[in-house]
Amino acid sequence: MKKIILALASVSLMIALACSIRDPLGTFIDEIPTTQNPYYFNFETSLQGWQVGGNGGTAGGVRSLVRSSAKSKEGSYSLKMHCEFTDTSATNNSGMAGAVLSGVNLTNKPVISMWLWIPLAAFGADPTGSNPNMIQIFVKTGTGLSWFADTVELSDTTKAGIWAEYSIDISAAPGGTASVGEIGVKFLCGGGANTTAFSGDIYIDAVKWLPEPAAGNYIANYTWEDGSDLNWVPETWTSDQGFNVPPAPVNSSEKAWEGTKSLKCHLVLTQGSVNFTKGVMWVDLPNATTDLTNTTISAWIWLTNGLYSASNPYGVQFTFKDTAWNYCNLTWNNITNTSSGWRKFSTRISSDNFNYNAGCDLKSIRQVGIQIAPGTGDKFDGYVWLDKVSITN
Ligand SMILES: [Ca+2]
Ligand SMILES: [Ca+2]
């Protein structure tokens, strides 16, 4: 019975995949966070909506924003904010950059953290004097986009020229925390000896909403730090056995997103072949009747650039089997990495996000999987690593 269902699922899935490739439905971390996917900015593939001046604010001495591989806190890229605060004019002694958000609800996550790399030059000629330069982390909240900022005086030069974490608690934002419409960074010259303070680059990366889910909010959390495979196994059904190739998946210290270990998986894909249309890695949940409705699943996957295809993108999907072995897939996510590295995939587990569903009941799930499939005509033989696969509510 299980195999018949899977065979039907595979045929329908191939149709679904073909549609997905033409019309990607990706929910990426590297897109602007929405209420469905409130996570963070890592600048790995785009500016993620950040713009000079933010949403109608003063650009001032902030002259450009580009992705840069010169420095990164997480991944391979950061956002480089080029600044030229070179005189005392009102339009040039401060300036900002920000990202427009689509009313993200941070009611339960009122602390926003970001990492900034601020060069010593930005601290000005007199950092410990009476007019230090300043950095503001700001948000605009509520229907009126009310301004709220946390000001940091750039007087502690031990934080110059390194990645340092800056955060803002928006609990007291006048517009409330239920609808955050913008987040950004503002630089202000201090005046006095710091009036003509700074020409150079500030780097921004790893902008997150804190706190991360408490342990009690994890329905599942696979980090592979115990050295085992955590009972993750490859699918062995005919068309889906891309991961069912030697050597078997194994705990690995070669790469890790979190901690020192991950799961190394050999993957062979040949689109159109009988056996390697896609690969799926599965794990049995501790409870075979787990309710996953309106939870969030995320995974860090190390992807080689061999899995990048501009014309026929490879894709990643989360997949589930319910207590009765009915099968479903969530949103298809194109693999957009042009360089090898860790990439986070995160999707709200909801029937709204079905890419394919064979009657799967999200209220009673027994297995969770990650599947990778090629675009038309593509072939792959290589390794991927999984880490920090978690389901949270
Ligand atoms: Ca980054
Ligand atoms: Ca790990």
Image (cartoon, grey):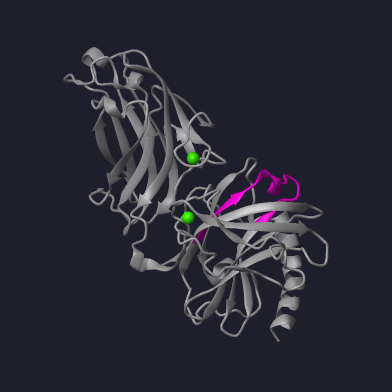
Q: Is residue 331 left or right of residue 224?
A: right
Residue at (43%, 43%) from the top-left corner?
A: 206
- Where 182 falls versus 362 (above or below)? above
Kindly tell me whether residue 55 is visible in this rendering: no
Figure quadrant of the C terminus: bottom left
Q: Quadrant of residue 155?
A: top left
Q: How many marks?
A: 0
Q: Is residue 274 left or right of residue 211?
A: right
Q: Quadrant of residue 218?
A: bottom left
Q: Nearer the viewer, residue 78 or 225?
A: 225
Residue at (37%, 67%) from the top-left corner?
A: 217
- Where 273 falls versus 302 (above or below)? below
Residue 132's spot in the image, x, y percent?
A: 23, 22
Kindly tell me whether residue 370 is visible in this rendering: yes
Q: Which residues are magenta?
A: 298-315
Q: Nearer the viewer, residue 5 or 109?
A: 5
Q: Quadrant of residue 369?
A: bottom right
Figure quadrant of the N terminus: bottom right
Residue 306: in magenta span: yes
Residue 250's spot in the image, x, y percent?
A: 59, 60
Residue 274's spot in the image, x, y percent?
A: 82, 67
- Where 267 falls versus 360 (above or below)? above
- Extreme-left residue of the structure: 130
Residue 184: in magenta span: no
Residue 188's spot in the image, x, y percent?
A: 30, 25
